[in-house]
Amino acid sequence: MRISKYISCTLLTSILLISCGGGSDSEPPIDPVVPVVLDPSAATLIFPDDNTECNEGIINANDESKSTVNFQWSTSENTDSYEIKIKNLDTGSVTTAISSTNQTDVLINRGTPYEWYVISLANGASSTATSDTWTFYNQGPGIENYAPFPAVAINPQRGATISNTNTTVTLEWSTSDVDDDIVSYEVLFDNIDAPTTSLGTTIEPNIEATIMTGNTYYWKVITTDSFGNTSSSELFEFRVE
């Protein structure tokens, strides 16, 4: 009887071991948890303020034609770092700065118009978010009156294709001036990429131009203030189909 009990216990133990271990190969693998990366939101610009003169820069001791300006913006959601783009509107050159906070110091030219914006970045996210674009003048030595900011195309938008439903198009633009003393605009317009034909001058931010189907047109705006200071816009273009 003792032998039988021993055999029975041994068989039972073996069956239990086989039952417990036999199902491991058939269980599906557990997928790793992949963290969700949220897209960043756009920052709101704070300083330098839009369409103003920036007079808070620290003049460079080695070169008084430059000053260090502290650019500031709001902290945006789901953002790990910021890319700041600062464009010299006189030369078209762009300075890029990277910051992990909502401000950064950048050395720029004095007496010069700039535009700037901020791109929000998130680690692991393919999408970015871009703030509005602001313009400002960095204060210069002895300047009593600033030239207007270069005009920006409103209609047709830069690179647009429009339908030729009429023989004319209304060119529209926007601009601003720290001193608020703009007196006139001259528009150069042609189907060559270096327009020299003047459509005349106007006190309004729009003017009519004659167009034809199948052509690409180029135009720019020269803005003048009451002191005779001028600014020339970038070259705008659109196609008529």
Image (cartoon, rainbow, N blue to C red):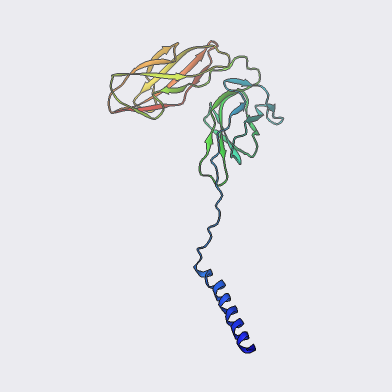
Measured as percent of width and height from the top left, residue 38 is found at: 55, 42
- 73 over 16 or under it: above or below: above
On screen, residue 17 versus residue 165, left or right, reads right
On screen, residue 191 versus residue 31, left or right, reads left
Residue 74 in which image quadrant: top right
- 13 over 86 or under it: above or below: below
Measured as percent of width and height from the top left, residue 137 is found at: 59, 22
Q: Nearer the viewer, residue 64 or 233?
A: 233
- 227 over 83 or under it: above or below: above
Quarter occupied by the N terminus: bottom right
Measured as percent of width and height from the top left, residue 39 is found at: 53, 40
Q: Nearer the viewer, residue 82 or 14?
A: 14
Q: Nearer the viewer, residue 2 or 52?
A: 2
Q: Residue at x 50, y 19 (%)?
A: 175
- 8 over 189 or under it: above or below: below
Q: Residue furthest right?
A: 61
On screen, residue 165 versus residue 145, left or right, reads left
Quarter occupied by the C terminus: top left
Measured as percent of width and height from the top left, residue 56 is found at: 68, 24
